[in-house]
Amino acid sequence: MVTDGHMDERELDTLEKLHVYELIGLPRKRFVTILTELCDAFADAEREDGSIALLDKERVDDYLSLVTDRTKRLLTCALALDVCKSDGSIGDAEMALLRYMMGSWRISLDDLEAELIRR
């Protein structure tokens, strides 16, 4: 949600439409608080030129390693794709992260489609 450098209200609305808040057991307000805290934690990723390394490979790998269940990985990828599309376009940084996540977890678009159709 913050890969492209800003959070769009439509992304939060998409999570609500998909009942993600209920799925993860957090009300929207608490989710936003946690997301804000996560963004604050990115402050330590500031580079010398003032940019922030949101897509730092080690940081991304650390987060990806927390999800070990294949079903949760599939769900995470599907939700990430929906959130990326919610503001009307998928930015380069969003696409890069989505591809990296799916590649790391060995998940293809066909896997997502097959899993979602099966359910």
Image: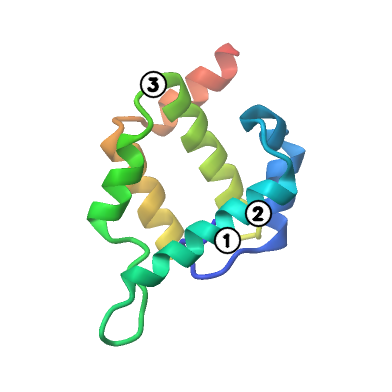
Task: Work out whether residue 45 or residue 78 is closer to the camera in this orientation and state it.
Answer: 45
Mark positioned earlier in the residue sequence (3 or 2): 2
Residue 36 disc label: 1
Q: CA distance from mark 3 to mark 1?
A: 27 Å
Neighbour tally class for label 1: few under 14, some 14-19, many 20 plus, Cα within 10 Å: some
Judged left or right of residue 39, residue 66 is left
Farthest bottom residue in view: 49
The answer, for residue 11, to whether it is visible in the render is: yes
Task: Indicate whether 67 appears above or below 116.
Answer: below
Residue drawn where x is 47% and y is 36% of the image: 77
List the residue tagged with mark 3: 70
Q: CA distance from mark 1 to mark 2?
A: 6 Å
* Element at label 1: helix
Q: Looking at the image, do the residues carrying marks 1 and 2 touch, with CB atoms under 8 Å apart?
A: yes
* Element at label 3: helix
Farthest top residue in view: 118
Please state which amino acid type lies under the numbered disc 1: Thr
The answer, for residue 91, to whether it is visible in the render is: no
Please state which amino acid type lies under the numbered disc 2: Val
Residue 57 in the image, given as x and y percentages of width and height: 24, 55
List the residue tagged with mark 2: 32
Neighbour tally class for label 2: few under 14, some 14-19, many 20 plus, Cα within 10 Å: few
Mark positioned earlier in the residue sequence (3 or 1): 1
Residue drawn where x is 62% and y is 31% of the image: 24
Please state which amino acid type lies under the numbered disc 3: Arg
Judged left or right of residue 69, residue 23 is right
Residue 80 disc label: none
Q: Find residue 103 and report its image quarter.
A: top left
Residue 16 in the image, given as x and y percentages of width and height: 74, 42
Q: CA distance from mark 3 to mark 2?
A: 26 Å
Residue 58 in the image, given as x and y percentages of width and height: 23, 53
Neighbour tally class for label 3: few under 14, some 14-19, many 20 plus, Cα within 10 Å: few
